[in-house]
Image (tube, grey):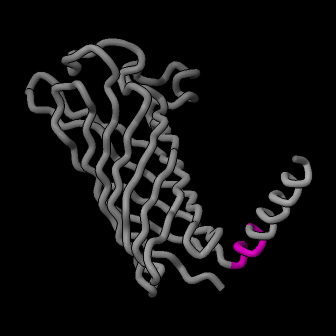
Amino acid sequence: MNKLATILFFIICAGISESKAQVAPGIKLGYNESRISKTRLEPKSGLYIGGFLDIPITKRYAIQPEVFYSSQGGASVSSDFGDVQIDYLSVMAANKFYVGLAKGFHFNLGLGLDINLKNNFVNLFNGDADGEISPFDVVVFGGMGYEFNFGLILEARYKQGTVSVDLFGADDLYEEAGSNLNGVFQLGASYKFKSK
């Protein structure tokens, strides 16, 4: 068992060290359509913008750490209350699986952490936060895309939150018992710079 673990460790290290020469940074920009479940809010339009590192592990698999700003929330349909605007710093880890002979079409699956830029842990500690919105969200996502040879990437993905947005109590916006979860459809473009 120890021999097998040692062999696997060296294979993984060799693969990672070989892939370091191929690591490519990139930028991404796109459209968000976000919803908060079990509320009287309509979908809200927003954007996301940020950067990533593409780390190929094999010819058909890459890991892609991402950090970006994401504008989310819900749109009000009543004059009694306004829109819910939540600005997140999203830290994601995408697993990219390439399909077909040409390295273009791919699926991505991953996990991430959305940190509320207004109601984060620092503001909660200092007493400066609005206690009605969760300071973070743990998300899962999946999608598909196409990568062109010159670096342009077109992608669509769906991001699902797992932590209730209304973590701390009640609000007039919520109409059903249970968790009020973020759900975000994302459509965007990325550009991957060529690795040297």
Task: Please report the bounds of the magenta region as a residue range.
Answer: 16-21
In the rendered view, does 6 fall on the left or right side of 113? right
Q: Position of residue 167 (x, y in %)?
A: 41, 20
Q: Residue furthest front?
A: 1
Residue closer to the observer: 193 or 138? 138
When asked about the image quadrant of residue 178, the answer is: top left
On whether residue 82 falls in the magenta region, the answer is no
On whether residue 17 falls in the magenta region, the answer is yes
Q: Measured along the vertical axis of the image, is residue 109 above or below residue 38? A: below
Residue closer to the observer: 27 or 185? 185
Which residue is at a point 31% across and 45% down the rendered structure image? Answer: 184
Most common SS among magenta residues? helix
In the rendered view, does 149 fall on the left or right side of 14? left
Which residue is at a point 37% across and 63% down the rendered structure image? Answer: 144
Residue closer to the observer: 58 or 122? 58
Which residue is at a point 42% across and 48% down the rendered structure image? Answer: 141
Q: Measured along the vertical axis of the image, is residue 20 above or below residue 67? A: below
Which residue is at a point 44% across and 34% down the rendered structure image? Answer: 118
> Is the C terminus in the top left, top right, bottom left or bottom right quadrant?
bottom right
When asked about the image quadrant of residue 152, the answer is: bottom left
Q: Position of residue 43 (x, y in %)?
A: 19, 41
Q: Position of residue 156 (x, y in %)?
A: 32, 61
Q: Measured along the vertical axis of the image, is residue 42 above or below residue 102? A: above
Q: Measured along the vertical axis of the image, is residue 13 above or below residue 118? A: below
